[in-house]
Image (cartoon, grey):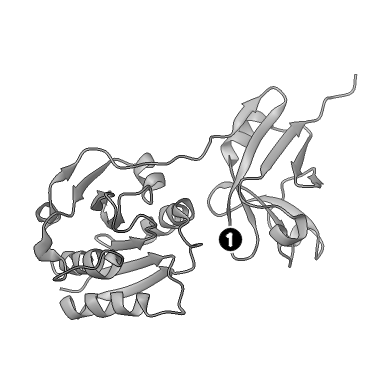
Amino acid sequence: MSSIITLTTDFGLQDHYVSVMKAVMLGIAPDVRLVDVSHQIPPQDIMAGAWVVRNASLSFPKDTIHLVVVDPGVGTARNPVAIRIKDQIYVGPDNGIFSLIADEFEYSARRLTEKKFWVDNPSNTFHGRDIFSPVAAHLANGVPFEELGEPVDELVTYRWAVPISDKDGIQGWVIHIDRFGNLISNIPADLIHKSIGNSRFRIYVGNTILDEVVTTFADVTDGEPVAYIGSSGTLEIAINKGNAREMLGVQKGAQISIFLQKQEV
């Protein structure tokens, strides 16, 4: 049986961690197709991992298995789990890493209590290799989801604050910064259309003010800031051919405010 397993971790590529996880999986399921989503999640940043998983995973074919290891609590009482959402399966720690996708879709979950699907004598500090990788590989070999362990009624979840909308405009936050330095907000396009409509407005982020949402980066000159609706459907701020995080001095968690301009009487 040939299946797809994706990998998302905060391990980077300097060390052996990713390769040894792949070695374990290939030893169990030699025909599996391994796809790297990202190994550059900021270390221990669970919500950054949750963001990447939410935006990448549902584009894969039916029955893809998503192995996700951003696990600062490895070896603690947090549970190893597998969850099924729509036609995809996710394997990883129950520490909030599946927050965004599990909050959006119905899911079923299993605690990984069946140790016959683990490696022998698992380490306390490398469950990615010793628990999650072999479980993902056994799933790829056709082991039924229900055999992995006991059901889990509710997963650990984190949530970003939702944007606030009132008569004066919208208050949101930078929830993710990609490798280009683009500032991704939690302000969805439909909220902008509903709250702002065709009214004049100004967008405040850091020490920068913008007065329009354009289509793409090239709608402004090189080195200029630009606001647009990104591929995830939310407001983003970028610098055309530059790095908004560096040039605007803005970090994750910073406010983004959209204020309606009062019409002159």
Location of residue 136 in the rendering, given as x and y in whole percent from the top left corner = 22, 65
Q: Quadrant of residue 104?
A: top left
* Vertical order, 53 against 262 (above or below): below
**27 or 241: nearer the viewer:** 27
Q: Nearer the viewer, residue 177 or 125?
A: 125
User: What residue is drawn where x is 23% and y is 75%?
Assistant: 25
Query: In this rendering, does residue 263 appear at all?
Result: yes
- Residue pointed to by mark 1: 178
* Residue that sits furthest to the top in the current view: 265
Query: What is the secondary structure assignment of the residue under circle 1?
Result: loop
Q: Quadrant of the C terminus?
A: top right
Locate residue 65 relative to residue 17 in the image: left or right.
left
Amino acid tagged 1: Asp
Q: Position of residue 14 (x, y in %)?
A: 46, 79
Q: How many marks?
A: 1
- Residue farthest along the right direction in this orientation: 265
Front residue of 7/202: it is 7
Residue at 66% x, 32% y is 170
> Which residue corresponds to the image point at 37% horizontal and 40% vertical from the top-left?
103
User: Residue 127, position in %: x, y?
Assistant: 27, 64
Left/right of residue 46 with respect to residue 222 in the rendered view: left
Foreground: 199 or 102?
102
